[in-house]
Image: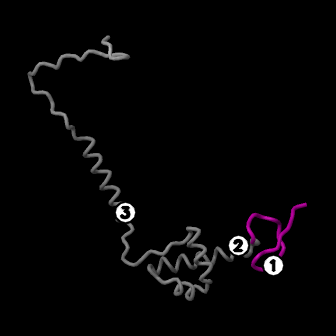
Amino acid sequence: MTPVQRCGACGRLFPFLPRELCAACLEEREARFRRVRDWYRANPGGALQDAATATEVEVALIMAWMAEGRLRRVPVGDDLAAPMRADEERRAAIRRTLTTTTDAAPAAGAPPAPPQPRRGLYGREH
């Protein structure tokens, strides 16, 4: 027999799951999350209280979603592509640095450099 628990929102009994809500309350909470998410997408930079009033969702619940990382407010005028462009510019600079050679190429017709003796353990030549 499976253990049962009481839903934290509506008080109904349901089979035990690691969450504290029954399936109906969980689905209703996800619908509320989607409303708030869509409101923030339509109103970037909107205040927390304005979102709560417009979507009829508690401020505490919106703050909990933000703390979980599921929801994020974007300030108005914030260029989301700026960090990606900066990363690309850094990568391009590193590529340029790595592909340019700092050693001068030997002049045409110059004799090759004599081979260096191979040294082994304790500096002995081989």
Disc 3 residue type? Pro
Q: Nearer the viewer, mark 2 or mark 1?
A: 1
On the image, the x and y values in percent for residue 44 come to: 44, 79
Q: Residues within 10 Å of mark 3 (few under 14, many from 20)?
A: few
Q: Which mark is residue 11?
A: 1
Earlier along the polypeptide chain: callout 2 or callout 1? Answer: 1
Mark 3 = which residue? Answer: 83
Q: Quadrant of the C terminus?
A: top left
Q: Residue most toward the top?
A: 126
Q: Which mark is residue 26?
A: 2
Disc 1 residue type? Gly
- Residue 122 located left or right of residue 23: left
Give the alpha-carbon distance from disc 2 to disc 3, as whole Å: 35 Å
Give the alpha-carbon distance from disc 3 to disc 1, as whole Å: 46 Å
Q: Nearer the viewer, mark 2 or mark 3?
A: 3
User: For residue 13, which quarter of the picture?
Assistant: bottom right
Q: Main secondary structure of the magenta part?
A: loop
The residue at the point 34 percent across, 65 percent down is 82
> Magenta residues?
1-20
Q: Residue most toward the front?
A: 122
- Who is closer to the viewer here, 33 or 121? 121
Earlier along the polypeptide chain: callout 2 or callout 3? Answer: 2
SS at circle 3:
helix
| Image marks 2 and 3: residues in contact by CB distance under 8 Å | no
User: For residue 90, which quarter of the picture?
Assistant: bottom left
